[in-house]
Amino acid sequence: MGERAMDLRYSQTDEKFRNELRAWLADAVPAHGTVPAEGDWDARRGYDTGWQRKLYDAGYAGINWPAEYGGRGAPLSEQLVYYEEIARARAPYVGVNFVGLLHGGPTLIVEGNDEQKAAHLDAILKGEEVWCQGFSEPSAGSDLASLRTRAVREGDDYVIDGHKIWTSFAQVADYCELLVRTDPDAPKHKGITWLILDMRAAGIEIRPLRTIIGGTEFGEVFFDRVRVPVSQRVGPENEGWRIANVTLRFERGTSFASQMVELKRFLAELVDAASRVTRHHASAWDDAALRREIGHMQAESDALWAMVKLSVSQANESGVPGIGGSAVKLVYSELYQRVGELAMRLIGRAALSWDDVGGWPNKRFLYSGMQSLSLSIAAGTSQIQRNIIAERILGLPKDR
Ligand SMILES: Cc1cc2nc3c(=O)[nH]c(=O)nc-3n(C[C@H](O)[C@H](O)[C@H](O)COP(=O)(O)OP(=O)(O)OC[C@H]3O[C@@H](n4cnc5c(N)ncnc54)[C@H](O)[C@@H]3O)c2cc1C
């Protein structure tokens, strides 16, 4: 993960930025209204992209994107201040803009050509274009390179046939970062191509999947002779595996930064709840074992924040986050699950209800606890992150 020393204390300039951002958020967040009802995807798209537009107009969009592509190009410490303040103000989460802003756009910045950059980057920053990720397939998740969705060249188009799964926000997306097999005879890592797919193209069918908490945020996407112009290929044909790894590094390395600040907020809520829950005539907070458990989690989250700083700083220097992002992703998702489990344990039987009972934040705790189960699967499972850390960071023998 690199051993150079970093000075991550906040300077006067950072604090000035913090004050400006905090003042802007104090007005902008309440003015943006409340989150739309679950399942109302059109409203959700409007809410998330509307917020993105406000960030853009105020000069805060693409905090880590280079200024030459319309981002703020903020120095490392300013990016961290940004994440802290966004979380503190409970500003809308990046939501449906996740793929475009946090890994699709960044991949185009590194690997796209000038036309592709001009066509998409500004639109992503303004919230005018929503992207989704078409990587996983029913038999290609952890073993992503086994993907079978086929692209056959016909004139100036690729013709796509196949099936993707777990595609988050496909129902509101305009474009998709799509991995296809262009050479079925080559070794599996060598026959893949990375395409920009227009989600309005003929022959695409989206079928929603329901999650454990009743949500429909992801679904299956079927392709029946979908035509994609060759000009929409990012990088050379059959080099998609290398480019997909750039995408995954952004996805695992820096895009979790704001969620980690959210984790700290969740922990603070847990402390508050612990001081209000009573057991045997004493508050739960009087239990030394519980305080120790929460203290450990707090210490782990502080250590994790230091890892985020390292990952963000590596991305700043090289343009692409380091492989250590896998460690960040692994620790973050497992810690979040433990916090979620503790939250449910703390409120006890109230965790059996989706409705807030007796003043307890059941819904919030239950939702976060259940949602956290997906964290160790999405963006590569914990087992796969462990394999990456073992093989590519620690240099241990390869997984068969
Ligand atoms: C909330 C959520 C959102 C998602 N959004 C998207 C999206 O937008 N786009 C997209 O393309 N995908 C998305 N995914 C899919 C995600 O990337 C895959 O679910 C993930 O990569 C695991 O693949 P799989 O589900 O096929 O499980 P499998 O690969 O079948 O794995 C099953 C189990 O076997 C283990 N395993 C597999 N191989 C190994 C190995 N070599 N060593 C040790 N253990 C192993 C896994 O860790 C896991 O526990 C999303 C998933 C979730 C949960």
Image (cartoon, grey):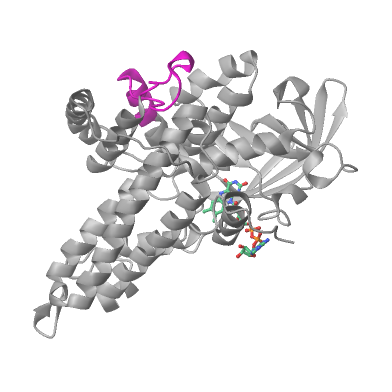
**Foreground residue, 57 or 10?**
10
Residue 299 horizontal side relative to residue 172, left or right: left
Instruction: List the single residue furthest toward the front.
Output: 4
Instruction: List the single residue furthest toward the right.
Output: 185
Quadrant of the image containing the C terminus: bottom right
Q: Can the viewer see residue 161?
A: no
Residue 16 horizontal side relative to residue 78, left or right: left
What residue span does the magenta drawing correspond to?
50-74
User: Residue 1 in magenta?
Assistant: no
Query: Where is residue 261 shown, x and y percent of the image?
Result: 31, 46
Q: Can the viewer see residue 320?
A: yes
Residue 337 horizontal side relative to residue 160, left or right: left
Quarter-of-image position of residue 290:
bottom left
Quarter-of-image position of residue 23:
top left
Residue 318 position (above or below residue 295) = above
User: Residue 68 in magenta?
Assistant: yes
Residue 290 position (above or below residue 177) = below
Instruction: List the single residue furthest toward the left.
Output: 281
